[in-house]
Amino acid sequence: MAATDTTLTEPAPEGATDADLTAGMRALLDGSHAGVRRLVVDGLTPHASILEDAETMPYADFRERVRDLVVELSESGLTGLGFPEEYGGGGDIGASVAAFEALAHGDLSVLVKVGVQFGLFGGAILQLGTKRHYDAYLADTVAARTMGCFAMTEHRHGSNVAALETVASYDPATQQFVITTTREDAYKDYIGGAAKHAELAVVFAQLEVPGEDGPESHGVHAFVARIREGGEPVAGVRVGDDGPKMGLNGVDNGKLWFDGLRVPREALLNRFADVSPEGVYSSAIESKSRRFFTMLGTLVQGRVSVGGAAITASKVALAIAVTYAGRRRQFEATDPDTEERLLDYGLHQRRLLPLLARTYALHFAQEVLRDTLHAVFSGEVDDDDVRRTLESRAAGTKALATWHATRTVQECREACGGAGYLSANRFAALKADTDVFTTFEGDNHVLLQLVAKGLLTDYAGEFEEMNQLDMVRFVAGLAVDTVLERTAVHKLLERVRDLLPGGASDGDEAFGDRAASAGERIEIRDPDYHLALLSFREEHILGSVARRLKAGIDRGGDPGAVFSSVQDHVIAAARAHVERLVLEAFAAKVEATPEGPVRNALVLLRDLHALWVIESDRAWFMEHGRLSSARSKAITAHVNALCRETRPLAQELVDAFGIPRELLRAEDLIGQGH
Amino acid sequence: MAATDTTLTEPAPEGATDADLTAGMRALLDGSHAGVRRLVVDGLTPHASILEDAETMPYADFRERVRDLVVELSESGLTGLGFPEEYGGGGDIGASVAAFEALAHGDLSVLVKVGVQFGLFGGAILQLGTKRHYDAYLADTVAARTMGCFAMTEHRHGSNVAALETVASYDPATQQFVITTTREDAYKDYIGGAAKHAELAVVFAQLEVPGEDGPESHGVHAFVARIREGGEPVAGVRVGDDGPKMGLNGVDNGKLWFDGLRVPREALLNRFADVSPEGVYSSAIESKSRRFFTMLGTLVQGRVSVGGAAITASKVALAIAVTYAGRRRQFEATDPDTEERLLDYGLHQRRLLPLLARTYALHFAQEVLRDTLHAVFSGEVDDDDVRRTLESRAAGTKALATWHATRTVQECREACGGAGYLSANRFAALKADTDVFTTFEGDNHVLLQLVAKGLLTDYAGEFEEMNQLDMVRFVAGLAVDTVLERTAVHKLLERVRDLLPGGASDGDEAFGDRAASAGERIEIRDPDYHLALLSFREEHILGSVARRLKAGIDRGGDPGAVFSSVQDHVIAAARAHVERLVLEAFAAKVEATPEGPVRNALVLLRDLHALWVIESDRAWFMEHGRLSSARSKAITAHVNALCRETRPLAQELVDAFGIPRELLRAEDLIGQGH
């Protein structure tokens, strides 16, 4: 066994790495936030031992460890970048998201604890409150002198915030709101910080003022309330502990019940609505539901942040698995001289490299999203359309990025065999901690339904206020062509239609195969061809959903039943939409990159990602006459070939993520010296 | 919100359950081992609190808790069913596998600890040893008075046991073997029991005897050795601890180094080979590699057991998620009167019900496997062909069942939203504990390559001895038709070809669409049609692999490179083969079931599973001219329809798994009284 005479995992052969590519790609990935990202990563590195503590400390102790580190990190100023400078913040929303993304290189309980304190709690004060709240809370929040939590979700209402059952009833006599959990099982749940550390809470409750015929409800509003004093719950607040979780055990999630908790009138976060001392409710936004969605819309940064963190977690997993696969020799080396590595095998390339390409794709899509968020929230852009597409894009990117993380971490762990199962090799925590990303800050399926609702109504003025049933009725009232013609994808498709075998009409499926054959003259790696395919799919599914909704209602169907019967298509339409946006972001990044090795590598990754996405849904394209069976097979062959082409750059492409050795750990897998 | 005025999770409406179906299906699932299964489950139930201990105890304590419970369980006799009665066993291999499968309803550290003690350690003594070892060890092993471990895997050789580097060198002067770890990094790793509890180990090492020109190596053999005395490693043994893992933290996995550990000559487990006092090696099996594979082959029960445990774990996850989905009301009920539940939504049915159908399918495939194992190992059948197909079937079923478990647990956890993330709701442990099933007892990809090797060589006499490169050369030396004609699937395909659109030849892809259209006259739910499609796929991929191997070698390619280039097809061929076996097992079970509600439910599940499997790979069938695009869409529509048809039976179908409330836990999700 000459091939196994030396250590099985060893550095890549001399001269095989290209430091220029690594550095150039890293600069491109870091982009305009390079400084912030590096400061965060450098700040985390001395605390890398927390990754081990996460595995070994009893969870009560680990909660304290995480809290202490969050407090310590806050001193650097890097956790408060999104707050105004006069309260100790950095005044830079984009940078604050970039910093959060970078935090995901480390322990994810720390990340989520930061998210709760500075994103959810601090963000709600900032976005929903006014100067009186800023003055009272922001400086202490930014400095982590006061810990807060975000009490929105209730046990009985996972994703339906509008229906929550906590009530804040105004009492003019005392000029106080009285906050009450109206039934035992309507408690707030999964509230990070509630079990142990939070002294303050932003509480979402149905606001009621006295009216002539009893209490008048004005819908869900947010209040800031003290829930703990000297470590103990205050009178009127009962606390439960969610106990151990699959992961994120450094975050003290808990339950909250309110039993007539009294807070002053000024506790109402009154940016969008207020109650006078006499108990008169007022708001500049007349519609109750529009007001509600305006409030929720200001909290979009949470979704942007979770999606970004999921992308970082995918990078960590890939950095370990790709490095390992590039070093580990196969046990049955085909030729002792060539010293074949695991990553030289086609199957292993297939498992890891498309996921690597997609991680790049999502990184660039996230960059667009982060920049838009910054533009909207810094006031550079003030446009309702931009704001609505931002919310849609945030929801869609979060869904795709978090599903991608779940899949990538799993594949990387399996690709490292039994060693991948040991906690020291990082996947255990990565997997357990990121798992909830698919359901928190909005369940992914619910988020995609939100995306689809926006597409189907073209973000009509009233779209935010529509529930699913309203949406069904709305769409059923439109001509299907109207739905389609108003969408951005329709205009895009007009432009790229020539690239699409089968021509303009989408009713020609019978000719699909012949048409598709004609299309085979089109270069398979033409990025416009990829975009044309994804755009066609998006418009086709969207049109099909609209037609089915309309037909269902026309047949006298119950709107709920009609919606239920097309629900999978609704989700598919949203996915197709977001996939197209991701591809566009990648293509635009390539266009903006100067000629050279970095651009060449990006072209490879862009094409690998695009063809892999098309391949994954090639059945659909064949069913709809856009791929012949020969073309479909050719796409698979190209994905294989692109994997082989990417393989020699794989190490550079993960090194470009810039993750310090201390944070990767996994000595067994990647060696100590890497 | 009338629809949410009452508790969101509540029992199904009166009259909706069918106790007869539940009981009948349960009896069918339990089959001939009903008694053993119920005894095991009843034995676990009083210890259900261990499921909570797994989440809360420090892992050092939890290891002791698990060990104590294993010792306690052994008193029931249910962990020793596979051993001869004269040593306190039950003398029933089939029952021992059924008992192991049932143990997977509880904590999986207990399961794996049982597997190590009675399966790996005890099984190796039983299968590789002779009466002197039985007399010395079996009674104490069965009674768990002595704890053992199974020291095969080495750090440098995950799946390549033949290449391991521990040496057992015979010293005639003392009549002892001297066991040595020949290099620091060639230690035994991931050995369950090694870190703490095991007093004895079955050690796999290269056996050497003195020869004229220095040591003569006879390949890998197993030895039984004491490694610990009074809780401390004996002289000559060094122990490392693998530390915390993703899951299974009640199992004390560790590393072992041997530094000249001396064991008596009789420590050699000498069923297949022996060394005389003078140091002369002898074996009835002349070929070194055949001897090795014969030894390994006796250990097949481990793979059968892991696959079965994975199926049980899938059942637990589905029982929770389906019950929850049947009780949880949707937040936007379409009509307050109909009280729509989560499981009434098409999307939710799609997420859970095909997985439920596949769990049934795998259950029946596992039953066939378990029965074959019993027949071979109890001596009822003594036939090399049966033995080889047993090994192949065990490898393939293990791969599919463990991947299925990973997927099912994940989908079920996501389908339960945020509550699915809390440890109390069971998914955290299910997910973390089962994750390693895909890589232990053989990495799934490696196992499928083993399956493919058997198919390609038709289990030729020499197949077990061939490594991948030999196999490539072997296949390249055959006519492709020979490869195919010798396979069972070829004969099967001859029988069902009429059902296949496109006719007999598989070179008619250009006519695929036309031919497929002709095939649409065939009833889409005809089980023979499903079988014909899966058989066609199997034979086609297998033929394609054989042709490519042959062509590659004919072009003068390096066998290793040729193999690498078709590796994904090799895996696909094996998967296609095992999928066909699973479908056949399900179909046979339906045929054997009398008319009635149980059979009707099975027909639904069989068709849902079959069409879902075909749908999942419909791109391939279209590419190969076996499905038209219209037929492909029709299959998707049928899967949806079958989900709707299955939905009213869903609760009965999970209740039939017979999992006691105490073991399911998850009160939040399924209520206390269920």
Image: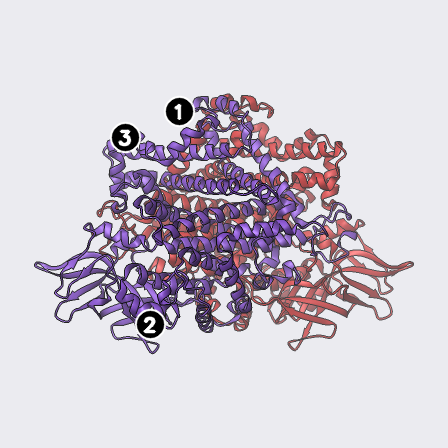
Chain colours: A red, B purple
* Whether residue A121 is situated above or below residue A237 in the rendered picture: above
Say which amino acid is labelled 2. Glu
Residue at the (25%, 39%) spot, across then down: B559
The residues tagged by marks 1 and 2 sit, at their Cα atoms, a distance apart of: 61 Å
Q: Which numbered circle lies on residue B138?
A: none
Q: Which numbered circle lies on residue B199?
A: 2
Point out the tag, 3 or 2, that comes first from the N-terminus: 2
Residue B158 screen position, x and y as percent: 32, 55
Instruction: Decide if residue B49 is in sight here.
Output: no
Label 2 environment density (alpha carbons within 10 Å; few <14, some 14–19, many ≥20): many
User: What residue is pinned by disc 1?
Assistant: B505
Point out the tag, 1 or 2, that comes first from the N-terminus: 2
Label 3 environment density (alpha carbons within 10 Å; few <14, some 14–19, many ≥20): few
**Circles 1, 2 touching at the beta carbon (< 8 Å):** no
Report the side of A439 relative to B163 (left or right).
right
**Circles 3, 2 touching at the beta carbon (< 8 Å):** no
Q: Give the structural element (helix, strand or loop) at label 3.
A: loop
User: What residue is pinned by disc 3?
Assistant: B479
Image quadrant where one finds the C terminus of chain A: bottom left
Residue A299 screen position, x and y as percent: 66, 55
Tag 3 subunit: B
- Residue B553 falls in which quadrant of the image? top left
Instruction: Decide if residue B659 is in sight here.
Output: yes
